[in-house]
Image (cartoon, rainbow, N blue to C red):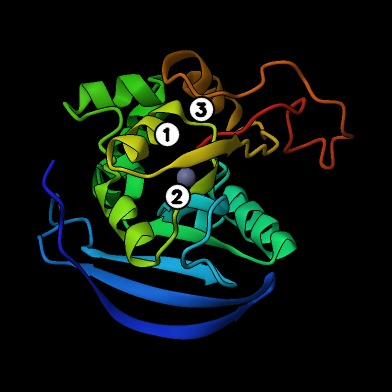
Amino acid sequence: MKAKTLHQVAEATLPTEHGSFDLVLFRSDEPAAHPGLSNEHLALVMGDVAQKRGVPVRVHSECLTSEVFGSLKCDCKQQLEQAQLAIAERGAGVIIYLRQEGRGIGLANKLRAYALQEQGADTVEANEMLHLPVDAREYDVAAAMLRQLGVESVELMTNNPDKIEGLRKNGVVIEKRIPVLVQANRHSKQYLDVKRRRMRHEIPSSPRSEPIPDPDSVEPPQAVND
Ligand SMILES: [Zn+2]
């Protein structure tokens, strides 16, 4: 796979609820995979990560529906916040935020797939009905960003074995995996089940024992996704 040329375009301090990060914007020379996607990607960096090993890293793909509108269909927003919290606790780490909405199919196709899911298709079937790949995400950009930040090796926050494989193929040294466990709700439960059964995500299927905060919106706890 040929390496994409990435330029570090801008950088600023971003105070957040979970501590102060440096937000670094990278731009790829190549056009995005299709017009609905961006060629600008972000790194949210805390602490000193250059020339460091075992840096906590989350490689996170944009999910406008949950992160902006609070959609309950997936748990991307919680995973992102959990990663910020975990990094703040450790005092250093990186969130690579890739603008590849809907596992890389773009926002319009993601909404079309949601409409098909309303008619009974699961997330994999919906993409197949639209003649789209189930997961079109690419990790070469994430690998290049980590290289440019000088990160030598990572502890990767993920449940997704394909992500580990994709990053390793692109030269990222992964010392270990940190699971990202998020509680399912009644809207996301089926989606997470499909990810576990059909997309090999390492999601515990046995209920965890925490109390259920909102009986109306939360299924017996389990879950996680990526
Ligand atoms: Zn999502």
Quadrant of the drawing holding the N terminus: top left
Q: CA distance from mark 2 to mark 1?
A: 10 Å
Location of mark 3 (residue): 191
- Amino acid type of disc 3? Tyr
Query: Is tag 2's residue or tag 3's residue first in the polypeptide sequence?
Result: 2
Q: CA distance from mark 2 to mark 3?
A: 20 Å
- Check the image and report above or below for 133 versus 15: above
- Give the foreground label among 2 and 1: 1
- Amino acid type of disc 2? Val
- Check the image and report above or below for 16 versus 92: below
Q: Secondary structure at mark 1?
A: helix
**Cβ(mark 3) to ligand 1 < 8 Å?**
no
Q: Residue at x 51, y 51 (%)?
A: 58
Q: Secondary structure at mark 2?
A: strand
Kindly indicate the quadrant of the structure image that contains residue 129.
top left
Location of mark 2 (residue): 59
